Amino acid sequence: MNLSNFNIASDFIAVESDGVYYDLHNNLDFIGLSYDVLNRKVKLSWVKSTGDWVATDCPNTLDLEFSSVSLFKCKERDSGTPYTEDDCLESLGFIHNNMTEEIESFAKAAPSPDACHLNISFMSGFTLKLAAESAKCSIS
C-alpha cells in the first residue's frame, strides 16, 4: 500500500502528514466510513473532538481515503462495551499479508511488500482490516 501523503506514527494511534502529528485516539472522533464497491474505494472519517484538552489548531476533519481496495473486512463491536467507545481509535498498523484471518493485531507502522494489510481497531472492539493499492489523508 502506497501512503501518498501521510504515515502512521510510531505510537500506532496517530497519523503524520507534512510533519504534523494528528492524534486519532485523543483529539479526533471517528464518525464513519463509506465503501464505494463499484470504484473499490473506502473512506474513513474523523472530526475534531469537543474535549477541552484538544488544541485549537486541531483540524476540523480528517479523512483517510483508500483506492483500489482488494481486501475489506470488519469485526463486530463488543456488545458489552458502551457505545461511547465506538468513536475512539485504539490503534492502527500493518500486519503480514499471510495473516488474513488475524484482524486484531499488527506488527508495523509502515507497509512493506509482505505486510500491507492495515488493521484499524476501536475501543469498542470494532475492527477494520483492509488492503489497497494506495491511501491518502485529507485534512480541513
Image (cartoon, rainbow, N blue to C red):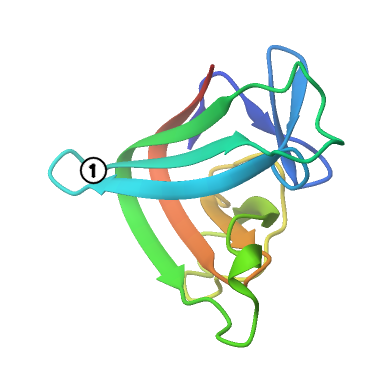
Is residue 2 found left or right of 83 in the rendered image?
left
Q: Is residue 11 above or below residue 52?
A: below
* Residue depicted at 47% across the width and 69% down the height: 100
**Residue 139 coordinates in the image, percent (x, y):** 55, 20
Q: Is residue 77 left or right of residue 28?
A: left
Tell which of 104 and 83 is nearer to you: 83
Q: Position of residue 135 (x, y in %)?
A: 46, 31
Seen from the viewer's position, the closer of residues 99 and 123 is: 123
Task: State how many labels appear.
Answer: 1
Q: Residue at horizontal 60%, vertical 55%?
A: 87
Q: Please tell me which residue is depicted at 62% across the width and 87% down the height of the picture.
A: 80
- SS state under label 1: loop
Q: Residue furthest left?
A: 38
> Among all residues in the image, which is located at the extreme bottom?
80
Rendered view: 63 above or below 84: above
Q: Is residue 38 above or below residue 81?
A: above
Residue 29 located left or right of residue 97: right
Residue annotated with mark 1: 40
| Three-letter code, disc 1 | Arg
- In the image, 140 versus 137, the foreground residue is 140
Corner quadrant of residue 28: top right
Percent of width and height locating residue 107? 72, 57
Residue 36: percent from left, percent from top: 22, 44
The correct choice, above or below, for 140 with respect to 115 in the image is above
Name of the residue lying farthest toward the top? 18
Q: Residues within 10 Å of mark 1 (few under 14, many from 20)?
A: some
Q: Quadrant of the C terminus?
A: top right
